[in-house]
Every structure is written in C-alpha cells, then in structure tokens.
Image: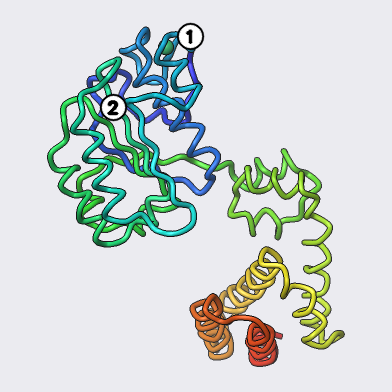
Amino acid sequence: MNNSLDILSLPKHQDNLAHAYIVEGIDIKKRLINIQGLTRSLLCQTEQTIVGDFCGHCHSCNLLNADTHPDFMMVNADEGTIGVDDVRAISQFLSNMSHLSGNQVVVIEHAENMTENASNALLKTLEEPTNKCFIFLLCKTKSVLLPTILSRCQFIQINNKSKDELKLTYPELADYIIGFSNNSESELAKWVEEQKVEEFTEVYQLFIQWLKKQIPNFVISNKVLSNPLMSSFLLYLIEKRIRQLMLKSAKTGNSTSALTASKLLTKYNQTSNLIKGQNKALAMSQLLTSVEPLIR
Ligand SMILES: [Zn+2]
C-alpha cells in the first residue's frame, strides 16, 4: 500500500533517512496526513524498506490504527506550550527498546509551541539519536524554531496548492477568502462546511463601505468583536489595504501614512490578546479611528 506522500524529496530507502526532520507547511491537515503516512511506513512490520509504503494489516499497522502503538509517541500542544517535562518524556520514551519493528517514531505537532528551555532540552536528544529513532517536528514555518534546532534537522516542505489551483477547486470563493486562509485548503474546506462564506462576504462589504466612509466605525466593530475569526479577517483586510498602499506609494515616494498605519496595526496585534471584555471593543474602535484616515 502506498500513501502517495507529498514528501517526494525524501530518500526512497528507509536506511537513508535522517533521524530528525522539520516538517514545514501551512496546512495543518496536510502536515498530519503526510506524517501519518510516514509513521505508518516506518513502523509497518511487512514493508520496511521503501519510504511511504506500508501493508495496512500487520500487527503494527493495526496498533497504529487503534492509536495504541508502543513505539509511537505524539506530542500535541495546539494550545499552551511544550515544556521541558514533555521533552523529558520524549527522551525517556526513546531510551526504551522498540517493542515491534525496531523503529521508534516521535511526532511533535505544533513544534512552534516549544518553550526555549524545552528546545534546549531537545537539542541533547537530537545530538545523540538512538539508532532507529525518528523525530518529526511539525510547524507552519521553520523560522519560528531556534537556529540550534534548525541546524540539527533536515527539512521537509509540504507545499500548498497555489491560489489558482484553489480557485479551480473552490470557484465560489472570493480572492480575499483564499488569501485570508493563507492558501490552506483544509481551512477553506472547513469554512465552506461551516457555512462561513456568507459571513466573510458580509464583513468584506462592511469593510468597503467603511473605507468609503458610508458607515461609522462601530457598525463594523460590533459586527466582528464577538467573533475571533471575523476579527482576524477584518485585521487581514486592513493589513492587505496597507500593503496595497505601500506598493502604490513606493512609486510616488510618499509612504508615510501607510507606514504609520502599519505600525498602529502591529501594535494592536501585539497587545490585543491581553485586552479583555469591554476594553476589547474600545481598543478595536481606537484602532479603526486612528487607521481609517491613513488608509482611505
Ligand atoms: Zn503493516
């Protein structure tokens, strides 16, 4: 059985794989599908040579299906952080002998959530890999990881579909929705399934009206405030507008307004998570008031 991995850049034979890989790609689902295929192929007891191949029915494949494989460890922290204790658990796990095929696999999902101390603790494990262990660090972009970690890992880049390919798959979606997803197909599929498209369109139209000064600030901020997804969508639209203006002003040589707007937006993004309750509305309204004359 072949899992048709995206990861075509990997060596064909297991013996040639490195011990540690950083798997980089914006689409979380794609990252996971790829890594599941790799894990299967590394742990399968029947197909042990070709990367990507697995039988799907041996004892090991069955244990993986049941999420009870003793040689597989998944560290997941999509919220919160991965701390030193988590990394200690990894080295503890790897110090055991493999129970089945001989290989051991550790997957760290959201590796960007590792604390600095945890990263430093992981270095030791990366420096002294046990013979048949494989560690995969999954993240959106490797630039968020410590250089010392980067220097000890190989990279796997999982490519997203291009904007044009996504437009073919989702002809009904506007460019600004595809752009907001960062070309993430799984994100788009989720939004379509959850029927968010209409809401995006509504916020987009409000944004255009707001830029034209046809509606006051509170109409648009009231629309998005109680909804984190729509709030970030509005911020994305503002950022996109600022970028357009910067491009334009690069030609005319006057980019002061766009730069000021960009600074205000960055400041807001840095502090808005800390703001709670009523003050959130106030902060958003302040941002809109200050940015509006700069990006019109
Ligand atoms: Zn198998």
Residue 167, image quadrant: top right
8 horizontally vs 115: left or right: right
Seen in the picture, residue 11 relative to 199 is either above or below; the reply is: above
Point out residue 271 in the picture as x, y percentages from the top left corner.
51, 81
Residue 219, image quadrant: bottom right
Seen in the picture, residue 50 relative to 197 is either above or below; the reply is: above
In the image, 21 versus 179, the foreground residue is 21
In the image, 105 versus 246, the foreground residue is 105
Seen in the picture, residue 286 relative to 155 is either above or below; the reply is: below
Residue 112, image quadrant: bottom left
Q: CA distance from mark 2 to mark 1?
A: 19 Å
Q: How is the image coloured?
A: rainbow
- CA neighbours of label 2 inside 10 A, class few (<14), some (14 to 19), many (20+): many
Query: Residue type at mark 1?
Result: His
Point out residue 62 in the picture as x, y percentages from the top left corner.
47, 15
Point out residue 64 in the picture as x, y percentages from the top left corner.
45, 22
Point out residue 73 in the picture as x, y percentages from the top left corner.
36, 34
Mark 2 or mark 1, which has the lower sequence index? 1
Q: What residue is shown at x 56% (from left), y 79% (from top)? A: 272
Q: What residue is shown at x 37% (from left), y 30% (from top)? A: 9
Residue 57's disc is: 1
Secondary structure found at label 1 = loop
Q: Which residue is mark 2?
A: 104
